[in-house]
Image (cartoon, rainbow, N blue to C red):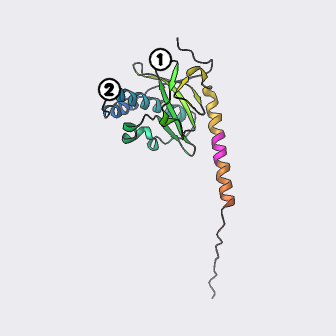
Amino acid sequence: MNKVNNFHTFTSPISTAAMKLAQKLSQQQVTPEKSQQVYLNSLAVWSVKYYLDCIGVETDIKESDSMNPAQIMLTNVADLVVKNLGKLECRPVLENEQWIYVPPEAQSERIGYLAVQINALLGKAKILGFLKEVSTDNLPINELQPLENLLEYLDSLELKHINSHKLQEATLPKNTIIKFKKMA
């Protein structure tokens, strides 16, 4: 039995367009194992993008390594760029799994990690929860933080980003502009 903490999850349909793109990316891989990995990673990313769109968080999927054919061929990444904040890692989890696998190449340069349970046969994905950081390859699902805390966490990161930007502007030297009046 798949034990998940008693908090809200988000179930979304997996769009036909997302399935087609995942299929296309997976067909470019050389082994069946890599093909399956890319397919599930792509579905997880698109599901998180859908969720973030629903709650008003801007993403830039085109800038994500997980949509770059060269990157996905060489690495196991499932990242989604959140505008002005950084990358969220969207890790796929199959039903009845108790652990989330986060490969070493995805354990840094991320603002957070989401676990996404994929049911491609039913065309559904369920976001189970998130973690701010990881330090190991295998994470127990029951250690996930509630998904309802994600928006608050992203808001706090955005506030830090805004304050950091304001501080940089305040410390940069100001250029003086001199206007000359035309004399008659």
Distance from label 2 to label 1 (Cα)?
Answer: 20 Å
Q: Which numbered disc, 2 or 1, marks the residue closer to the eye?
A: 2
* Vertical side of 78 occupied by 121: above or below: above
Q: Which mark is residue 64?
A: none
Which structural element holds mark 2?
helix
Q: Residue furthest top?
A: 1
Q: Residue furthest bottom?
A: 184
> Which quadrant does the C terminus fall into?
bottom right
Q: Is 34 in front, or is 135?
A: 135
* Vertical side of 42 occupied by 61: above or below: below
Relative to 169, 111 lies left or right: left
- Of the numbered discs 2 and 1, the one sitting upstream in the chain is 2
Which structural element holds mark 1?
loop
The part of the chain drawn in magenta is 156-161
Mark 1 — residue? 95
Q: Position of residue 45 (x, y in %)?
A: 47, 33
Q: Position of residue 153 (x, y in %)?
A: 64, 35
Q: Is 103 in front, or is 5?
A: 103
Mark 2 — residue? 32
**Residue 96 on the magenta segment:** no
Q: Main secondary structure of the magenta part?
A: helix
- Snapshot quadrant of residue 166: bottom right
